[in-house]
């Protein structure tokens, strides 16, 4: 009995707690009526197709005529629109009734040019001078343009600097000049005289200029400081009436420097003792290994020896001195070549530019690591030596002893030169050069702030690949190239390839520009 009462109690309470349910029809019944439904939108009655055979044929023929007439008038309207658009944009119809060229007040200035201004009047390429390709402060060109203020002049070195700071050039006497290139005109002004400079590189806020005595001068470039405040005039002891300039800001290093390379925030020096030094070129919050000093950041403009690069431990556990032959810098990585043809790399490895597989632990390689010779064996069939190196912004290049060229690093814009657009390539890949065993690579030109590169072949032919958004490759076009391409000659003949004589001509690379100039390195 108590069970029945308990069940009855809970069933009653559950009925009280359940919400009442209503049928939707009951709720909407008051809004329903028996009137005929009339739609608010009137529809066009559909024509009934005739049942008679003759009438059907007539009906079909009428429909075919209508469709044919509609197609004809649509085609005429399309042709009329194309003709009107072509006439407007071609300059044959203007709202003011004029034909041909636009009035000067409304004419647009095109930033991309197919041929440089005044190219017909330019001097012959055999005349010493400088040709500029690519970005300017107010436009760009994909065709080499001769710089008239530098005609009949030979140079020792050219450093293309991004922005409005101006480019740096060293003339045949070793004087430093600032050269600014604009489509409105070129300006060349002296900066340092009587310094016997031979090479110049830019990093951070400074130029680093190497002179004949092996001293590295630090020249403020683009900041508030002026090089004049570090310059003093001295009277000649044997000719009292004449003076010469002495520049007093030099890097404090005892050894004689024979070469230098600069990245985005670091500088690498090579001395006559085949030893490498490094320093930072500006305030740096974090080291990515580009200095080769583990995680240490060297002081600004105070060179420190890279002991892990200058020394190594042989198989017997004895410390040996390594002789460095060549150095190259990317934006935040460094490549070095010793006298045995071995390659050592260190720095950022975000795109595999150090040649180490990209992992979380290898994001930064903070000490010099030798690139295994076995990685180069597939390209020659044997463990071969490397005879030259170069470094782009995030890409590394190696010229092998047989004249082949390999690359690794970032190839998203075609920098690898292997025909792909792979963004991360840690293993060396073969650059696709023309299949000519007698014409091999002699030199590679790349830049620490550039995404394009040049290769000079045995016969002097110049090949180019990589970024080309500003026409910096000089192939008269403005799209990226993923494999080496032959460039048109400086005579603007597309059928004749561009060739240079390494003894009298050289190339230099900037972020979105390039130049070809006559050299005098005596």
Image: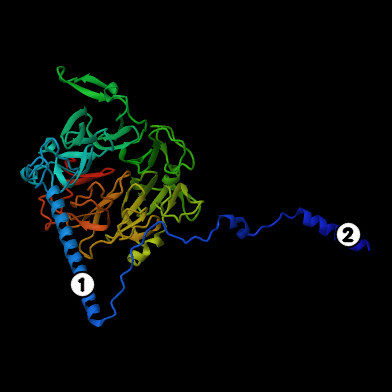
Q: Which residue is mark 1?
A: 62
Q: Residue 310: x, y in percent?
A: 41, 45
Which residue is located at x 35 percent, y 51 percent? 395
Residue nearest the observer in this picture, 444 or 75: 75
Identify the residue at the far right of this view: 1
Display colour scheme: rainbow
Q: Residues within 10 Å of mark 2 (few under 14, many from 20)?
A: few
SS under mark 1: helix
Quadrant occupied by the N terminus: bottom right
The residue where tag 2 is placed is: 6
In the rendering, which numbered label is found on residue 434? none
- State whether residue 192 appears in this view: no
**What secondary structure is marked by label 2?**
helix
Q: Nearer the viewer, residue 81 or 225?
A: 81
Q: Quadrant of residue 21?
A: bottom right
* Residue with the most extreme front position: 35
- Residue 394 percent coordinates (x, y): 36, 49
Q: Quadrant of residue 298?
A: top left
The one nearer the camera, 242 or 181, is 181
């Amino acid at each position: 009995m108590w069970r029945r009462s308990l069940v009855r109690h809970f069933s009653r309470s559950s009925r009280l707690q359940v919400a009442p349910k209503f049928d939707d029809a009951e709720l909407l019944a008051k809004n329903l009526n028996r009137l005929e439904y009339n739609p608010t939108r009137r529809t066009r009655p559909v024509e009934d197709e005739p049942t008679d055979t003759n009438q059907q044929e007539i009906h079909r023929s009428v429909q075919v005529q209508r469709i044919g007439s509609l197609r004809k008038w649509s085609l005429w309207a399309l042709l009329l629109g194309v003709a009107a658009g072509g006439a407007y944009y071609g300059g044959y119809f203007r709202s003011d009734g004029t034909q041909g060229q636009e009035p000067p007040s409304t004419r647009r200035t095109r930033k991309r040019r197919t041929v440089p201004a005044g190219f017909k009047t330019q001097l012959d390429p055999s005349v010493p001078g400088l040709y500029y390709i690519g970005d300017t402060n107010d436009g760009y060109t994909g065709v080499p343009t001769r710089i008239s203020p530098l005609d009949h002049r030979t140079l020792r070195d050219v450093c293309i600097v991004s922005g409005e700071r101006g480019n740096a050039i060293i003339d045949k006497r070793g004087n430093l000049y600032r050269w600014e290139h604009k489509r409105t005109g070129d300006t060349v002004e002296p900066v340092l005289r009587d310094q016997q400079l031979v090479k110049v590189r830019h990093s951070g806020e400074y130029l680093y200029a190497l002179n004949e005595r092996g001293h590295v001068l630090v020249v403020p470039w683009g900041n508030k400081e002026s090089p004049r405040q570090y310059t003093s005039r001295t009277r000649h002891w044997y000719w009292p009436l004449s003076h010469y300039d002495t520049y007093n800001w030099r890097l404090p290093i005892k050894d004689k420097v024979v070469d230098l390379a600069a990245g985005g925030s670091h500088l690498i020096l090579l001395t006559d003792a085949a030893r490498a030094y490094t320093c930072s070129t500006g305030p740096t919050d974090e080291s990515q290994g580009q200095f080769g000093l583990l995680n240490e950041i060297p002081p600004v403009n105070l060179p420190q020896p890279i002991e892990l690069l200058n020394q190594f431990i042989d198989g017997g556990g004895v410390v040996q001195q390594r002789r460095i032959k060549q150095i190259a810098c990317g934006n935040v990585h460094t490549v070095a070549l010793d006298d045995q043809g071995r390659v050592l790399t260190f720095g950022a490895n975000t795109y595999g530019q150090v040649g180490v597989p990209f992992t979380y632990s290898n994001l930064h390689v903070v000490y010099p690591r030798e690139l295994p010779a076995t990685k180069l064996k597939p390209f020659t069939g044997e463990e071969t030596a490397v005879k030259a190196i170069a470094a782009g912004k995030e890409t590394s290049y190696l010229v092998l002893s047989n004249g082949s060229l390999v690359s690794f690093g970032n190839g998203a814009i075609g920098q690898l030169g292997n025909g792909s657009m792979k963004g991360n390539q840690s293993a060396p890949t073969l650059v696709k050069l023309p299949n000519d065993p007698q014409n091999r690579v002699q030199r590679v030109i790349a830049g620490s702030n550039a995404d394009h590169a040049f290769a000079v072949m045995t016969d002097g032919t110049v090949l180019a690949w990589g970024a080309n958004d500003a026409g910096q490759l000089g192939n008269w076009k403005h799209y990226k190239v993923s494999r080496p391409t032959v460039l048109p000659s400086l005579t603007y003949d597309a059928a004749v390839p561009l060739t240079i004589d390494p003894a009298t001509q050289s190339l230099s690379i900037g972020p979105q520009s390039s130049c070809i100039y006559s050299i005098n390195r005596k």
